Image (cartoon, grey):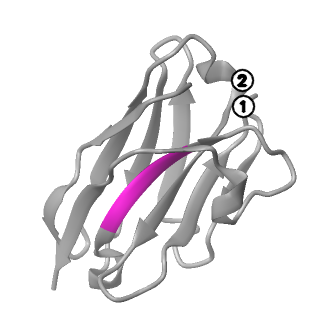
């Protein structure tokens, strides 16, 4: 069982930066692939980024590639999402996720655990 809690969301102007953190409970954090999804008002929840359990492989949605960076600190049971050059279209609730599936990387069924989400609002 893994419990996830996100923090670091807030209001930022376009072009600014935010760093989201996700603290995970449990002693098996290093066994999980970690990621982030987001859901804007009235839209489907979508994949944002993923980091393999080894920390060697990263994947990003095309819309955030080059602007967002996912990282993890296994000693602290924490995963991060550094967001830069933010745009109004990045406004959404951001969800931290943890999963064991190696093949399902970009879709919700690939993740067993979800955090409650943190709101990110980018003003123009």
Q: Say which label, 1 or 2, has the lower sequence index.
A: 2
Q: Which mark is residue 10?
A: none
Q: Residues within 10 Å of mark 1 (few under 14, many from 20)?
A: many
Q: Closest to the observer: 15 or 45?
A: 45
Please say if 119 is above or below 20.
below
Locate the N terminus and report the quarter of the image it occupies.
top right
Residue matched to label 1: 53
Judging depth in this view, the residue of 61 and 77 nearest the camera is 77
Q: Is residue 77 left or right of residue 53?
A: left
Residue 123: % across, % down: 14, 79
**Image coords of residue 15 (percent x, y):** 26, 72
Callout 2 secondary element: helix
Question: Which contiguous range is marked in magenta?
Answer: 93-97
Asked whether 98 or 14 is in front, the reply is 98
Left-right relation of 9 to 29: left
Quadrant of the rendered structure where residue 13 is?
bottom left
Give residue 91's position: percent from left, percent from top: 28, 75
Which residue has dot 2 on it? 31
Q: Nearer the viewer, residue 101 or 64?
A: 101
- Residue 59, visible in the rendered structure: yes
Badge 2 density bin: few <14, some 14–19, many ≥20, Cα 10 Å: some
Q: Is residue 109 above or below residue 70?
A: below
Quadrant of the frame with the C terminus: bottom left
């Amino acid at each position: 069982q893994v419990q996830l809690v996100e923090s670091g969301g807030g209001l930022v102007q376009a072009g600014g930066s935010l760093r989201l953190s996700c603290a995970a409970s449990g002693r098996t954090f290093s066994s999980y692939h970690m990621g982030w999804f987001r859901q804007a008002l009235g839209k489907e929840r979508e994949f944002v980024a993923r980091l393999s359990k080894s920390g060697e492989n990263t994947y990003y949605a095309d819309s955030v590639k080059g602007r967002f960076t996912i990282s993890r600190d296994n000693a602290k049971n924490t995963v991060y999402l550094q967001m830069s050059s933010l745009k109004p279209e990045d406004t959404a609730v951001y969800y931290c996720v943890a999963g064991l599936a190696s093949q399902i990387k970009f879709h919700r069924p690939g993740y067993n655990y979800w955090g409650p989400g943190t709101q990110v609002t980018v003003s123009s």
